[in-house]
C-alpha cells in the first residue's frame, strides 16, 4: 500500500518546521529522575500542550500524583475507531555530560541526524504523531479516526504514577486501541514492529561496615571491607553460565518456541559486527543463548552503578564505612515484578556477608508484555510502516521496558501496537542520543498512513464518545 | 627508671605552649595526595623548619625529587651517639569532610583531646621530639646525644622519593640509630613498642566495556557489564576462608612462632568490644586466625575505593562504559613488594572476564620490616617509655606501613626503634582524627627521657661527625 500523495506532499513540505519544533522541545531539560529539574519537567508538559493546541487538538495539562500529562484529543469522527496515542516528554539524565559532542539540551543537526537528549526517546517520536495529525487536519480538515494523545512525564523513572492516572482518567482515555511509538526498528533496512517488551524493577543496595572509614593498616585484615562484601554480593548474583543464581527468579520465563527461534535466527544480525560497534572484545550473556534471545526474551539482573571508598587523586588507604550499588532487572513472559523485587531483596539480605550490615530497598514495577501479532491494529500498523518506509516490517522484541504498555494491557485492557522507528544505535539513555532524520520524516508519513489504515482494519469503534471500559 | 625532675618540670610548664604550636601546624593543610595542596605542603615544611630554628637546631629545607624535607640537627655531643629522629609533616586527605565534628584543619581541644588532621599522624608526634629537645636545651643548655631530625612530606603517599633522598643526603643523615614516632601504643593502659611493620603496595584497576554507556534494556543481557566484571574480579581475589587466592602471594609469609602466639594471646584484647567500638556486627579476617594476628602478622589485599556507572538521584538504566577500583596490599615478613605488585597485576589481567578489557596499573613499594627486640636502642626506648608513662611497655606489631622504616633498614642499615604513643582509636586517616593530650604530654617526657637513656644504652657512637656508611 502507499500513503495518500496529498499527505506525503504536506509532510515533505514541512520537514524544516518539524525539525524546529523538535529542537524547541529538546531545549527543555525535562529530566524526570532529577528533583532539581522539576520546573523544567512541568514546563515541557506545557510546551507540548501548546503545540497540540496549535495544530488543532483540544488540549490540556492533566494533573497526576507526579509529573503532569500533556493531553490532546480530536473526536470528530463518530462511528470510527478511537485510538490512544502514547508517548512521554520526560528524558533520561545526561551525565557523563563531558562525553557529549554537542550540548545535550540543544538539538544539533549533523550528518542527517539530530542530536540531543530526548531526540528519539521520546520527544521526536511523540512529534511524529502530532505532525501526522497536523498533516491530516491541514490537508483534509479532519482525521479518519478519533485520537487521544497522552504524553506523560515519568516514563524514565518507571511511570510510578501512570497506573493511577489511567484509572483516574479512564473515561477520558477510553479507546479501541493504543498506539505507542517509543521503540526502535531492527535496523535502517529492516523495518519492524515490536511485539514483546521486557518489564523492569530496581534495587538500591547499601553495605555498611565500620561507623567511619578506618585506616587499612590498623584494621585491614580484621574488619570486613564493605566494598569487598558488595563485590561478593554482586558476583554471587549470577552463576558461571551467566544465569541469575536466585532460586525462583526464572519462574514464569518460558523457553523460546521453535517458530520464534527460527525467526530470530533468520534476522540479519552479526554478533561480531555488534561487538565491534560497541567496542567490546566480545558479547556476553547466558551460555548457550544468542544475543537477540538474551536481549529480548530473557530476563536480566544488572548493576547500573556502584560507589564507595576513596576515588580522588592518589591513594587513601582506608577500609571504607560503606559501599552502595544500584541494580535493576529486566523481566519477560509471566515474571511478576512484585515477586521478583521481593525475591531479590530477600536473597541479598539473607546472604549478606558476615561482619557488615546489608540493606536493600526496592522500587519500580513494570510488567513485561507480549502483544499478539494477530490483532487487526497490528496488521494495520504493518501496512502503514510499509507505506512510510517502502518495506513490510518484521516482528521483533525489545529489551527495553515501557511501563504504560503494561498499564494499558492491565487497566484499559485494549489492544496495542508498538510502532517506533528509532534505530538501535540511537544511544538513548547515553551521551550523544540522536534521531536519524530519515527515520523521523519516514515515521511522520508512517503515522499519517496508519490513521488512514485503522478505519479499514476491522478495529471496532467503541471508545470514541463513551468509554468501553473503565479501570 | 624515672625522668630527670628538671626536664619533667619544664615539660609540665610548657603544655599550653606546645598545644599552640600543634594547632598552628594542623592549620596548614599539607595533604600530600592532593596536587592542589602542593603550596600548603611546601608551607608546612617551612613552618617546621622555623620551629626547629626557634628551639635552637641548625635547620634547613632539604629539596628532594618530590616534597621537601624539614631537617634540623644539634651535633654538640662529640663522642656520644647520634640519633636520626624521623617523622612526617604531610597528612591524609580529609574527605568525607562532612563527617568531621570540627574543621579538620583547625586543632580543636575537646575532652582532653586535640582534634584535627595530622594531630597524631604525624604532626603531634614530630612535635613531641622537638619539645623534648627544647626541654633539654633550655634546661641544661645541651643534649646528651647528637640529634638529626628528618621530617618528610610524602609519607602519606608512600614516600616515593624518600629512598633517593636518603641516598642523596646519606652523609648528612648518618647516625647510630633511628627513632621513629609514627605508631600507636596497644592501649592507654598498655604502653608498647612496635617491632613489626607491614609493607604496602597499590593498584588501580580499570575495567572497560562498551565505548559509551549503553541502554540496559537494549543491551542488558548481551553486553558484559563492567561493574559486574569488576565485582567478579574483586570477589575472586579471596577464597571462602578469606585467604588471598593468588598463587605465590603468601611466599615469604611465615606462621607465627609459638612464643609470639602466646604473647598475642596474653594481650588484653576484646574482640567483641572492638567490634562494638567500630559498630560492626563482627570482625572478619582469615578463618582460624585472630584479629591481632590478621592485623599485624598477616598480609592483606584490600579494596580502598570503587566507582562506576550512575550514582545520582533516582535510577539510570545503563550498562556503563567502565568501572574502576583502587586496591592495596599490606605485606609482612619476607614478602617482596615488587614481586607482589607484579603478581597481582598479572593475575587480574590474566583472569579478566571475557567481553571487557582490564588494565591494572601499580605503584608504591614499602617493604615490611621486623625489628629485633634485642638491640640496646630498643631496651633504652623501653626504659624511657616506662619513665614517661609509668609502666614498662610490651612488644606489638603494627598493621600500618612506614616506608622510611624500610628505607633506614635497607639504605642506612642502622638499628631503629618505633616509639609512637598514639592510641588505636585516634581515627588516623579518617574523619575526626585526634591525639589524647595525656599521650601527647606523656610522649614529650618519654622522648626527653629517651635522650638521657641512649648514651648509657651501649649504643655505639659513630654517626655524629662522620658517616658510618653511605648508601
Image (cartoon, coloured by chain):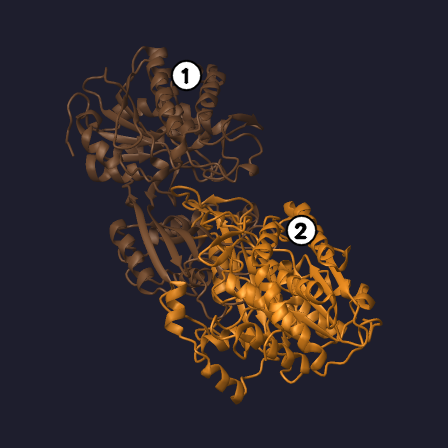
Chain colours: A brown, B orange
Q: Is residue B383 left or right of A299 when viewed as pictured? A: right
Q: Is residue A299 left or right of B63 when viewed as pictured? A: left
Q: Quadrant of residue B297?
A: bottom right
Q: Picture coordinates of residue A313 (x, y %)?
A: 60, 51
Using the image, determine if residue A101 lies above or below residue A72: below
* Number of marks in the rendered image: 2
Q: CA distance from mark 2 to mark 1?
A: 80 Å
Q: At x 56% / y 77%, what residue is drawn?
A: B386
Q: Quadrant of residue B393?
A: bottom right
The answer to whether any part of residue B91 appears in the image is yes
Residue sitting nearer the eye, A335 or B455: B455
Q: Secondary structure at mark 1?
A: helix
- Residue B418, label in figure: none
Residue sitting nearer the eye, A8 or B163: B163
Q: List the residue tagged with mark 1.
A: A5
Mark 1 — on which chain does it sit? Answer: A
Mark 2 — on which chain does it sit? Answer: B
Q: Picture coordinates of residue B81 (x, y %)?
A: 76, 76
Using the image, determine if residue B408 lies above or below residue A125: below
Q: Picture coordinates of residue B216 (x, y %)?
A: 43, 46
Q: Secondary structure at mark 2?
A: helix
Q: Tag 2: Cα neighbours inside 10 Å, few (<14), some, or many (≥20)?
A: many
Q: Nearer the viewer, mark 2 or mark 1?
A: 2
Disc 2 with disc 1 on a shared chain: no
Q: Quadrant of the C terminus of chain B?
A: bottom right
Q: List the residue tagged with mark 2.
A: B44
Q: Quadrant of the N terminus of chain B?
A: bottom right
Q: Picture coordinates of residue B170 (x, y %)?
A: 80, 67
Q: Is residue B437 left or right of B197 when viewed as pictured? A: left
The answer to whether any part of residue B183 appears in the image is no
Mark 2 touching mark 1, by CB under 8 A?
Answer: no
Q: Tag 1: Cα neighbours inside 10 Å, few (<14), some, or many (≥20)?
A: few
Amino acid at each position: 500500500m502507499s500513503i495518500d500523495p496529498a499527505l506525503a506532499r504536506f509532510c515533505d513540505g514541512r520537514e524544516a518546521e518539524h525539525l524546529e519544533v523538535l529542537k524547541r522541545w529538546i531545549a527543555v531539560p525535562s529530566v524526570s529522575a532529577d528533583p532539581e529539574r522539576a520546573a523544567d519537567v512541568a514546563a515541557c508538559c506545557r510546551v507540548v500542550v501548546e503545540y497540540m493546541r496549535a495544530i488543532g487538538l483540544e488540549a490540556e495539562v492533566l494533573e497526576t500524583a507526579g509529573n503532569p500529562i500533556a493531553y490532546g484529543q480530536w473526536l470528530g469522527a463518530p462511528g470510527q475507531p478511537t485510538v490512544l496515542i502514547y508517548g512521554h516528554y520526560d528524558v533520561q539524565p545526561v551525565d557523563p555530560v563531558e562525553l557529549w559532542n554537542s550540548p545535550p539540551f540543544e538539538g544539533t543537526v549533523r550528518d542527517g541526524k539530530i542530536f540531543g537528549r530526548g531526540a528519539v526517546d521520546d520527544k521526536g517520536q511523540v512529534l511524529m504523531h502530532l505532525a501526522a495529525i497536523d498533516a491530516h487536519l491541514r490537508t483534509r480538515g479532519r482525521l479518519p479516526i478519533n485520537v487521544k494523545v497522552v504524553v506523560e512525564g515519568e516514563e524514565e523513572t518507571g511511570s510510578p504514577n501512570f497506573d493511577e492516572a489511567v484509572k483516574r482518567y479512564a473515561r477520558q482515555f477510553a479507546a479501541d486501541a493504543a498506539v505507542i511509538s517509543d521503540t526502535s526498528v531492527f535496523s535502517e533496512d529492516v523495518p519492524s514492529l515490536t511485539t514483546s517488551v521486557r518489564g523492569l524493577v530496581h534495587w538500591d543496595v547499601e553495605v555498611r561496615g565500620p561507623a567511619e572509614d578506618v585506616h587499612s593498616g590498623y584494621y585491614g585484615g580484621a574488619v570486613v571491607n564493605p566494598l569487598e562484601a558488595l563485590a561478593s554480593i554482586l558476583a554471587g548474583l549470577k552463576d558461571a553460565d551467566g544465569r541469575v543464581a536466585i532460586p525462583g527468579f526464572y519462574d514464569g520465563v518460558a523457553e523460546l518456541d521453535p517458530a520464534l527461534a527460527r525467526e530470530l535466527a533468520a534476522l540479519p544480525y552479526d554478533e561480531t559486527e555488534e561487538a565491534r560497534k560497541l567496542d567490546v572484545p566480545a558479547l556476553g550473556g547466558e551460555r548457550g543463548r544468542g544475543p537477540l534471545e538474551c536481549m529480548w526474551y530473557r530476563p536480566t539482573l544488572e548493576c547500573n552503578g556502584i560507589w564507595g571508598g576513596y576515588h580522588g587523586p592518589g591513594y587513601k588507604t582506608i577500609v571504607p564505612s560503606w559501599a552502595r550499588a544500584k541494580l535493576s532487572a529486566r523481566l519477560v513472559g509471566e515474571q511478576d515484578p512484585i515477586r521478583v523485587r521481593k525475591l531479590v531483596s530477600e536473597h541479598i539480605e539473607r546472604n549478606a556477608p558476615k561482619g557488615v550490615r546489608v540493606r536493600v530497598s526496592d522500587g519500580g514495577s513494570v510488567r513485561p508484555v507480549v502483544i499478539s501479532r494477530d490483532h487487526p491494529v497490528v496488521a494495520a500498523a504493518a501496512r502503514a510502516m510499509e507505506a512510510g518506509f517502502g518495506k513490510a516490517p518484521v516482528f521483533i522484541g525489545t529489551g527495553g521496558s515501557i511501563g504504560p504498555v503494561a498499564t494499558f494491557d492491565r487497566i484499559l485492557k485494549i489492544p496495542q501496537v508498538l510502532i517506533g522507528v528509532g534505530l538501535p544505535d540511537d544511544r538513548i539513555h547515553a551521551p550523544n542520543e540522536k534521531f536519524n532524520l530519515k527515520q523521523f520524516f519516514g515515521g511522520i508519513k508512517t503515522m499519517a498512513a496508519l490513521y488512514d489504515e485503522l478505519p479499514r482494519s476491522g478495529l471496532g469503534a467503541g471508545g470514541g464518545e463513551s468509554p468501553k471500559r473503565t479501570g
